Image (cartoon, rainbow, N blue to C red):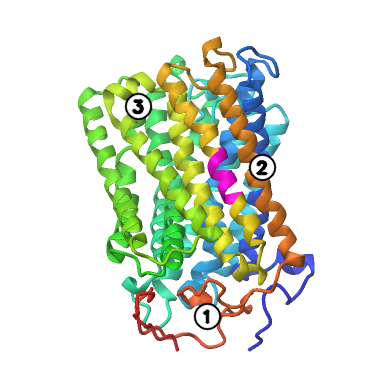
Amino acid sequence: MSDTNYLNVDYGIRSWLLTVDHKRIALLYLGSITVMFFLGGVFALMIRLELLTPAADVVQADTYNKLFTMHGIIMVFFFLIPSIPATLGNFLVPMMIGARDLAFPRLNLASWYIFLVGALFTLWAVFTGGVDTGWTFYTPYSTVGANTKVIPAAVGIFINGFSSILTGLNFIVTIHRMRAPGLTWFRLPLFIWATYATSVIFILGTPVIAITLALVGVERAFHIGIFDPAIGGDPILFQHLFWFYSHPAVYIMILPSMGVVSELITCFARKSPFGYSFIAISSLAIAFLGFLVWGHHMFVSGQSAYASLIFSFLSFAVAIPSAVKVFNWTATLYRGSIAFQAPMLYALGFIGLFTIGGLTGLFLASLGLDVHVHDTYFVVAHFHYIMVGGALMGYLGGIHFWWPKITGRMYPETLSKIAALVVFLGFNLTFFPQFILGYLGMPRRYHVYPDEFQVLNVMSTAGASVLGLGYLLPMGYLLWSLRYGARAPANPWQATGLEWQTPSPPPTENFVVTPIVTGPAYCYAGEEAEVV
């Protein structure tokens, strides 16, 4: 069996476009979602430029509506949801469980092509008129508007849903059927537990949003009364269907980052995770409870007060397994031998920002307070503390942690630490003022606002500039490292896990000989796990 690494087998474009190597497919996803991330970032920058002053100085209302809609659609459906599962998940799941590839390699490649087709449909909608409904596609905006490309955008998201379903199916089968000998469930890395829980949500939740958007298209094209009350539909039905998927989708975005942070904390604290089984089971608990709380998005929709009380209680309950993770990460850090490398800085930033996002989520789960701050910038700030402060910090931490394994190259250590700090500071300067704006009553999705809100908006726009610089820095030095970075050893961080037992970058087949696991997933505290 050849030990040539996957990057050096064949440099031809055709070999990449037809590859069934999970590692190459992960890199194809990485390139694709990076393009989508920076495109969504451009829309965010235009939004912040418009909000720099109280008046409509840059764009008018219709254009502004399209900007925040296209920013949300691209970032949620084409970056945040696939970011870690499609990139790090694709690359790491087989190696972490001692397998040579995913269970269905061709299906894996097909999922990337499906993602591209869905993205092209949506981008065509973006650049041939745009969409102005908000990323939630609420009716009647999405069903009766005349000058917006709702149908092609919905078709793109519908198609992209199949990519998520196939990815989740592939991960579930692989984790069940292809683990190395001796790798029992409670010897699995915590990243695998998080990926497994995310895959369950992919399978159960994605069909709901796909069918919901298909019904929007049917109603819009054929004037069949499904959601539009003017023709006999029910707009509240749309909200139920949309949020039944979209609240679990929050955990699609955050659970993989939690798995990454579990790996980073244990490695750079040089300790086995405190309460391994609790962290593992909490991932499944989050996936389960996430399907029961959609109604807290609808406290002001006229739903029954009794239903709202139940959803409020369940929303508090879903915070418990998340709190378990934060507590256990903190306990793992206690008296650890902590190394403040760039991946660890992102992990610590994740804990801080996710904690703020989670606690403010409890505000929104409280009926009385939610009525006050509903559809204000308080919600925008909370959402971004979870999605950007949480999901993206975990994603960047994971990219920095496994970059030497992926590429066989190291990146500049000092510059990477600076970038992590810039991202953390820029993020807080951008979004913390929005909590205050929302509490004071500034509604989201408005491009003009009273003069008294300008100072806080200037702070937010200034923070967005810093945050943008923080995102550009890793792009620059990671690309630089591909050519000029020092060659990485097999295990530069002295981490545990089967993926670190292979060369950097790994051979095409991952392992020359299938490993046999005889010990726990983590052995930093003197517990030696034999890997034969």
Q: Nearer the viewer, mark 2 or mark 3?
A: 2
- Label 3 element class: helix
Instruction: Look at label 1 and name its amino acid.
Output: Gln
Between disc 1 and disc 2, whose residue precedes?
2
Q: Could you say which quadrant of the image residue 119 lies in?
A: top right
State the CA–CA distance, disc 1 to disc 2. 35 Å
The residue to which callout 1 is attached is 501
- Label 2 element class: helix
Prevailing secondary structure of the magenta residues: helix
Magenta-drawn segment: 419-426
Residue 352, above or below 180: above
Q: Nearer the viewer, mark 1 or mark 2?
A: 2
Number of dots carrying numbers:
3
Residue 320 visible somewhere in the drawing: yes
Marks 1/2 in contact by CB < 8 Å: the verdict is: no
Q: Nearer the viewer, mark 1 or mark 3?
A: 1
For residue 35, side relative to residue 431 (left or right): right
